[in-house]
Amino acid sequence: MPPRSSTAARSNRLAAVLRGAAQARAAALRGALLLGAAAGIGLGPAPAAFAQADLHHALVYYTGAIGPGPQVNSLVAERYSVGITGLEIAQNARSIKDQNPDFQWFVYNSGTDNYLQSEEDLLLAALAAQRGVDVEIAYIHFYDDTRLTLQGQTVFIPGWGGGSAATMAEARVPVYFSNLSRRVANFSTPVARQIHKEAFLALSVDRTFAGTTLHPDGIFLDNSAHQLYNTGQILEGGRVLEVPGMPLIGSSAFQTWHWETGFGPFLTALKDTLETSASWSADGKRKFLMNNVANVWSDSYVSRDVADILFMEFQYDPVRNPDSDTVQRAWDRDRLAAAAGIRSFYAPAMKRTAPPYPGEITYGEALLGSLAWHLTTRTEQSLLFLFGTSNPAAAGWDTLTWRGCVDVVEDQLGAVAGDPYIFTQGTDPTGKNYKVWARPYDNGLVLLRNRGRWDEGIEPETAVSVTLPASLHPLAPSGDIGPPTTTLSMRNGTGAILLGAR
C-alpha cells in the first residue's frame, strides 16, 4: 500500500479543512435556506419514490454465549452494519455475519487501563520478559505514598521511589474501582507502546469468536479520550513517577503528557499497523480501530489519525447536551472527522428528564429527538445507535433501540438536501432563549431544539410555535404520519421530523 503520510502532512490537511470551514458553512447556510423555502418540500405532488435516507446503524451487543435468539439476531443482521461486542458471543457472531456478510464486529478492550492478574496483565508480563525488560514499563506509578477516594472509599497506594512501596507493582496508579483492580497503562516509551500493541492484537483480531473460525473485524478501545478520567480525588500525595517534574495525577501537565507523549502516539501507531492488516491477519482481511472518546472532543483525534471510528458514548441528545451552539459544534466535528476518513458513531442515551430541573418527555419523544439530532448533524458515513440498552437479550430491546420512525425515515425522508442551519430563534414563554436548528432532506425537514443551557428544564410551558415553510406531515415515534400542518409546537429538549407531499 502507499506509504503513510507524515504527522506534519496530516496537520496541514486538517488546517486546510479548518480554513475552509467558515466559507463552506456560509455557502451551505445560504443553500439550505433556499432549499427550505423553495426546493419542493411539500409544495407539489409527491414523487413516485424517494431515495432512501441511507443511514448507517451500529449497535452495542453485550450478551453471553447463549445470546438473544435467532429472531433478534435476524433483526441485528437486517438493521445494523457494525457491532461492539466480546469474543464470548460465539455462534451469535457467526449467525449475524452469515446473514449479513458486510457486518463488522469490533471486540472490546479498555484502552487506558487493564485489570490486575487479568489475561492482558499476564500477557504484558510475558511480552516484556521476551524483551528482557520489567513489565512495570507498561504501567504508570505513584512516586509518593498516596491516599485517594474512589467510589466514595478512601484507599492507600504506596509510592515507588518516594514512598513505602516494597515493589514497583504496588505503586501502579488505579482508576475506577475502590478494590484497586484496574491500573493505568503507560504508553510513553517505544517498548511500552510495542508490547501494548502486541497484547491488544493478540486479545482481539488474532483470535476467533468462541467455537467458531470467525475473526473480529476490528478492536473497540473503551476509555480512549484525550484525557484520563476516574483517577479519584487525591487526599495526599498523587505525584506520578514517569512524568517529567512528577505532576499530580489528573493535572493539566499530566493530561498533556499522557496524551501527547503516550496514548495519542500509541493510537496512531496501532491504527497504522491495522491499515496493513490484510497482509498479516489470519483471515487475510483488513482490520479497523474504534475508540470510545465519550463526550470529550479534541481536534487531535483527526490530526493524529487515531481511529477509523470515533465512538461518542451517550452523545448526542437534545436533553443531555445543552448549549444552543452544541449542534453547530457536533456538525463541525463530524465534518472534520469525515474529511479525514474517520466515521463518527453517535450513541445517544435518550434522556427524558433533566433533574433537578422540571419536565419530562416520553421515551418515544426522547428517541425521536435523538434521531432528529443525528439527522441534523451527521455526515454521509456516520453511524447511529439509539442506546436504550447494550444487551440485545434484554426485555423490550427492540422498542428500546428502534421505533417505527426509524423505518419511515429510511424509506421516505430521502437524501440530505443541505447543511444544518438556524431555522428560528427567540425567547420562549418561560423566558428561555432558544434556537431551533433545521436540516432539509429531499422529502422533508428535520427540526431540533436542544436545551439552551445546563440549568433549563423541559417542561411543557417552554413550548413555542414554529411556522413551517410549507404544509408538512409530522412523524410520530411510532412511525405514524400525521395530517399536514403549517405550524408545530416544540418544547425544550425535543426534535421533530416532518415529511413533504404524500
Image: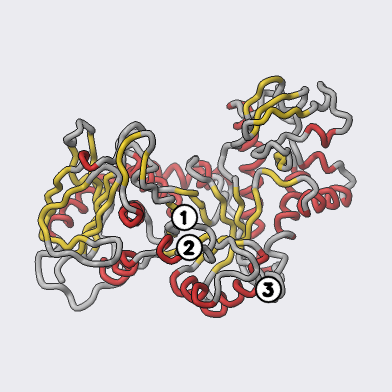
Packing grade of label 1 (10 A; few <14, some 14-19, many >=20) is many
Viewport quadrant of the C terminus: bottom left
Distance CA(mark 2)–CA(mark 1): 8 Å
Image: 53 above or below 229:
below
Viewport quadrant of the N terminus: bottom right
Please tell me whether mark 2 or mark 3 is closer to you in this view: 2
* Residue 227: quarter of image: top right
* Residue that badge 1 annotates: 345
Please tell me whether mark 1 or mark 3 is closer to you in this view: 1
* Residue that badge 3 annotates: 283
The residue nearer to you, when weighing 253 against 73, is 73
Q: Residue 497 location, x and y as percent?
A: 25, 58
Element under disc 3: loop
Q: Disc 1 marks which amino acid? A: Phe
The residue nearer to you, when weighing 168 against 401, is 401
Q: Residue furthest front?
A: 395
Instruction: Say the numbered circle drawn on residue 58.
Output: 2
Looking at the image, is mark 2 or mark 3 earlier in the sequence? Answer: 2
Name which residue lies at 54% across and 64% down: 83
Name which residue lies at 76% across and 39% down: 139
Distance CA(mark 2)–CA(mark 3): 23 Å
The residue nearer to you, when weighing 145 against 71, is 71
Q: Disc 3 marks which amino acid? A: Asp
Image: 490 above or below 213:
above
Can residue 1 be seen in the rendering of this structure?
Answer: no
Q: Are marks 2 and 1 in contact (CB under 8 Å)?
A: yes
